[in-house]
Amino acid sequence: MSLTNYVLIVLGALALFAFWLYNSLVRAKTRVEEAWSHIDVQLNRRADLIPNLIETVKGYAKHEKGIFENVTKARSALLGAKTVKESEEADNMLTGALKTIFAVAENYPNLKASDNFKELQDELADTENKIAYARQFYNGNVRDFNILIKSFPNVLLASVLGFKAAEFFEVNQETRKKPEVKF
Amino acid sequence: MTLYSQIAANRRRTFFLFFFTFLIIIFLGYLFGAYYGNAASGALLAFAFTIVYSLTSYFFSADIVLSVSGAKPITKSANPYLYRMVENLCIGAGLPIPKIYLINEPALNAFATGRDPKNAVVVVTRGLLESLENEELEGVLAHELSHIQNQDIKVMTLAAVLAGSIVMLANIFLRSSSWGSSRRKGGAGVLILFGLLLALLSPVIAQLIKLAISRQREFLADSAGVLLTRYPEGLAKALEKISKDPMPLQHVSEATAHLYIKNPLIKGMFASMFSTHPPVEERIRRLRAA
């Protein structure tokens, strides 16, 4: 066989490998995107609950204006978030702001006892749980995708084919800290 | 073994299940046909019967199992606690949300069934809901959802359906040949032959079911479930409670026993002969060793 034949065979094998790699990258990337949509659904649900919560709390605690500002700001940041990083920051901000609202609510027994408030609290807690589970699924998919594009020899072709590592959705370090209990 | 190799193993099992069942069916039909003088059409008839019978029972299997176990569907508003827990775990596993059914009995047990993840059902008993803590119930539900994700439910359903069609066909042949025996000479001989054949077939059928229900399956569902909840102790505690529960289930048949998280039949002939479940102590030990 002549040299050109060898070159052709090698090129053909490379092309086949590139096709295969491209398809598996597309599959993994689609999985990541689909997993992200699960988080997005829950983030939107969380944002949708906020106006209702503000109205309910206002009904009992009119003069506590300061606490609503942060929540509203975090909510619009969450709705306007374009990237994973932005969503992550806005969501963590919202978690912090909601904590203040619920802490303030402790001072208003009537508010705490209202069915509407209880229901909202319940819904928000459920949404937070769902975000946590969706995050677990999303991060698992991101991990698989990133391993795929960063391992050899895929790493040589992945960037040429236009694939970039996906971002993890992480929890704020502060919310991860265990609460201190003092007696 | 990982989740993916388990799915691959289940595909292999499905193939062998089909292969051996149809071999037996065609053999049965052939023998029966030969007795009436036309072996080929006997085999063909048996083949056609099995296709129709197993297809219908495959598509209705979940409904049949549910009605045998006396399970009733629950809605989100009826039991938001359970519903949300299943919903959350499904989000974590990337599964569609299965239908959720409740068996109104005090015994502690649970199972999953269905053809595929899109047509799956998770069933729990009232006793389980009442006596398990939050993270224990979560462990059990994650275990059941892993059975769905692993395609275990499909293999188990197919095993039951195919084994059932062999028994059904053997019954039909046995009866029709006993009717014929008054008109034909030598009918008694054929009866004995079929009786023998059935006796020969039973261990094969049992083997078929065993093939599908490898005991490894429970360990795998345990570990896959724990991967979802990230809390082995929850399932370990739940298994402890479930194994100590002396209450037997009221509505359970031998045909559905292999589905449950704990063998619902009280220790007897069937339980020891098949032993579809590994010992609970061993499962708990493995969960705590991690």
Image (tube, coloured by chain):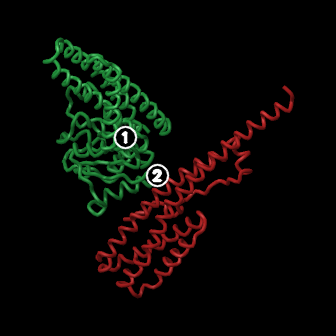
Q: In the rendered image, which residue does mark 1 sit on? A: B153
Q: Which residue lies under the disc numbered 2?
A: B94
- Considering only vertical position in the picture, is B70 above or below A181? above
Identity of the amino acid at label 1?
A: Ile
Q: Residues within 10 Å of mark 2 (few under 14, many from 20)?
A: some
Give the percent coordinates (x, y) of residue B71: 23, 49
Residue at x-position 32% and y-position 28%: B45
Mark 1, mark 2: which one is toward the viewer?
1
Q: Residue at x 33, y 24 (%)?
A: B41
B111 or B42, nearer to the observer: B42
Q: CA distance from mark 1 to mark 2?
A: 17 Å
Residue type at the position of mark 2: Gly
Q: Is residue B117 above or below residue A118?
A: above
Q: Colour of chain A?
A: red
Tell which of B185 and A31 is nearer to you.
Answer: B185
The residue closer to the viewer here, B174 or B163, is B174
Chain assigned green? B
Asked if badges 1 and 2 are on one and the same chain, I answer yes
Is residue B280 at least partly visible in the picture?
no
Is B158 placed left or right of B68 in the picture?
right
Chain at numbered mark 1: B
